[in-house]
Image (cartoon, helix red, strand yellow):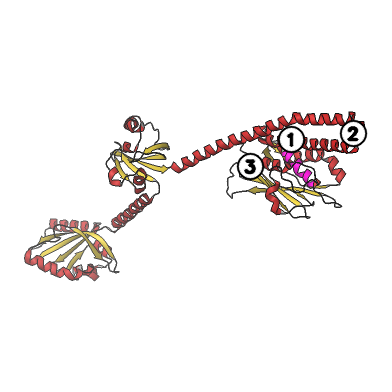
């Protein structure tokens, strides 16, 4: 019987639908021989129609399915027991190039007049599987990061119920993870936060007004043993379908707080000790002034009015006494100057070091001319400093360079500088940018094994040969430290000395 025109139209329409389908469609006979494969199925498996039509369907299967398929068909024909027909499941296919891929297979049985055929619909899920694998890998990576994180991480829902807690957070609060999951977050809070937290959550849900979410702040936590400790808490909010989650990142700052407290107490003790020392130096120096003035006054009277009544030895005693009084006066004045470096200090301002150096050299003009000293100087920059103290610093060091000259050698004093930076980075931190000022002479020098001594108060290496109290270099070091730097020296006996003064260009006053 010839098919009617309507039947032909239906067949053409059905073929067009099958050929245009995205999923693969394959028909096999009861022996497993491929009768048809639509273009999508051919493309999925990488074959041409002449390569597979008439072949056993197992050519599209990897082992062990390839070896088991004939047995499966025979078993079905004998028993009618289905493993996949009418059910569908995920299986693995083998392409022409040998590569394997996953796909969803659904099989239907069609009974025709003269035979039974099976139709399989193949839905390639390779991309889906790759996406699932990537997502699992990402989730595993995130989970590994969370589990290994040093800081604590806790996730709660909008009711404050703990949904996730990493090992660091559990350990920090003294719990195991199972003791926290499903409990309310305020169990980790001391009062008054414990009582206020539910109200805060409700207020945020109602008004959206944030007090810590997305901001972060320092809070207190309550450990299982009742210990209260400080930590820095930052909270992020995640909006999921139908609900909100909040993740808190917990950074324990107990050691930081202990260190801050130790430093605070140390600074307070140091300030008190320094104040006592400065008061002692100031008061002692002032208390010494009055009896010293009397010694000088009566010594002068004795020398002028009783001159005729004194023996030569008596006159010598009076001269020695007055000389000692002068040295004592200078020592007291130097001690007062040392104590005033910080107690009587003034505000910092932008100063031109070159201008100050010029003024100091002008003050020392007579000494420079008398000794024949040659000054070699380069231009110095401007920094934030206290002008008076910088002037004192230059005066002391240049005076020393001239004082400790070698006999029979023209004194030469060189003054120059260079820029320094303690840490290499793009943006300078205040106090990090420094200059080094060098004051170099060709004088008597000293053995560097005494380097630590020369900057200590009252320390002198040359005994009574040179005048001085041994306070000048101690004052220089105190000034340099106050200006964010320090002072040191390089020297050899008989080969001169080079003083190196470091000063911050921008100073943080204290």
Q: Where 399 sits versus 47, above or below? A: above
Q: Nearer the viewer, residue 395 or 282?
A: 282
Residue 464 covered by magenta stretch: no
Q: Earlier in the sequence, mark 1 or mark 3?
A: 1
Residue 197 pos. (x, y %): 34, 33
Q: CA distance from mark 1 to mark 3?
A: 27 Å
The answer to which quarter of the image holds residue 367 is top right
The answer to which quarter of the image holds residue 288 is top right
In the rendered image, the quadrant that contains the C terminus is: top right
Disc number lying in front (3 or 2):
2
Q: CA distance from mark 3 to mark 2?
A: 56 Å
The answer to which quarter of the image holds residue 312 is top right
Q: Is residue 53 visible?
A: no
Magenta-highlighted stretch: main secondary structure? Answer: helix
Q: Report the span colored magenta.
A: 390-401
Is the Cβ of the residue at disc 3 closer than 8 Å to that at disc 2? no
Q: State the residue at coordinates (14%, 61%).
A: 83
Q: Earlier in the sequence, mark 3 or mark 2?
A: 2
SS of the residue under disc 3: loop
In the rendered image, the quadrant that contains the N terminus is: bottom left
- State the residue position of label 2: 310
Residue 396 covered by magenta stretch: yes
Q: State the residue at coordinates (67%, 48%).
A: 419
Residue 191 pos. (x, y %): 35, 32
- State the residue position of label 3: 484
């Amino acid at each position: 019987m010839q098919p009617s025109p309507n039947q032909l139209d239906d067949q053409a329409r059905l073929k067009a639908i099958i050929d245009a389908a995205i999923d693969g469609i394959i028909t096999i006979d009861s022996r497993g021989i491929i009768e048809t494969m639509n273009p999508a199925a051919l493309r999925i498996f990488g074959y041409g129609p002449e390569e597979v039509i008439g072949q056993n369907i197992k050519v599209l299967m990897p082992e062990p399915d390839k070896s088991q398929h004939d047995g499966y068909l025979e078993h079905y024909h004998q028993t009618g027991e289905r493993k996949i027909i009418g059910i569908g499941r995920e299986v693995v296919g083998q392409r022409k190039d040998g590569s394997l891929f996953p796909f969803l297979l659904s099989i239907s049985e069609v009974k025709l007049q003269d035979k039974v055929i099976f139709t399989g619909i193949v839905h390639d899920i390779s991309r889906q599987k790759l996406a699932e694998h990537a997502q699992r890998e990402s989730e595993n990576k995130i989970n590994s990061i969370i589990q290994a994180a040093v800081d604590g991480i806790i996730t709660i829902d909008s009711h404050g119920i703990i949904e996730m807690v990493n090992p660091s957070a559990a350990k920090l609060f003294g719990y195991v993870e199972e003791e926290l999951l499903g409990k309310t977050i305020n169990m980790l809070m001391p009062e008054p936060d414990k009582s206020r937290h539910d109200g805060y959550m409700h207020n945020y849900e109602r008004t959206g007004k944030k007090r810590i979410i997305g901001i972060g702040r320092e809070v207190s936590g309550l450990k299982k043993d009742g210990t209260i400790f400080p930590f820095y808490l930052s909270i992020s909010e995640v909006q999921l379908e139908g609900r909100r989650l909040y993740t808190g990142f917990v950074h324990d700052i107990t050691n930081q707080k202990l260190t801050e407290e130790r430093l605070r107490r140390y600074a307070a003790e140091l300030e008190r000790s320094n104040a006592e020392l400065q008061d002692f130096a100031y008061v002692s120096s002032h208390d010494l002034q009055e009896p010293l003035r009397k010694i000088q006054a009566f010594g002068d009277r004795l020398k002028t009015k009783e001159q005729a009544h004194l023996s030569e030895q008596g006159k010598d005693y009076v001269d020695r006494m007055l000389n000692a009084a002068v040295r004592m006066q200078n020592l007291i004045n130097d001690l007062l100057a040392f104590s005033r470096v910080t107690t009587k200090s003034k505000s910092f301002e932008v100063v031109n070091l070159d201008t100050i150096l010029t003024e100091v050299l002008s003050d020392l003009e007579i000494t420079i001319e008398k000794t024949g000293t040659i000054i070699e100087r380069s231009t110095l920059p401007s920094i934030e400093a206290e002008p008076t103290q910088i002037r004192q610093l230059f005066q002391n060091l240049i005076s020393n360079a001239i004082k400790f000259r070698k006999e029979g050698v023209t004194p030469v004093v060189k003054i120059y500088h260079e820029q320094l930076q303690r840490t290499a980075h793009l943006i300078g931190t205040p106090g990090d940018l420094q200059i080094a000022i060098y004051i170099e002479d060709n004088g008597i020098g000293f053995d560097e094994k005494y380097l630590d001594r020369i900057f200590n108060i009252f320390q002198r290496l040359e005994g009574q040969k040179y005048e001085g109290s041994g306070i000048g270099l101690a004052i220089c070091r105190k000034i340099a430290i106050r200006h964010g730097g320090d002072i040191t020296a390089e020297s050899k006996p008989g080969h001169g000395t080079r003083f190196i003064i470091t000063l911050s260009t921008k100073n943080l006053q204290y």
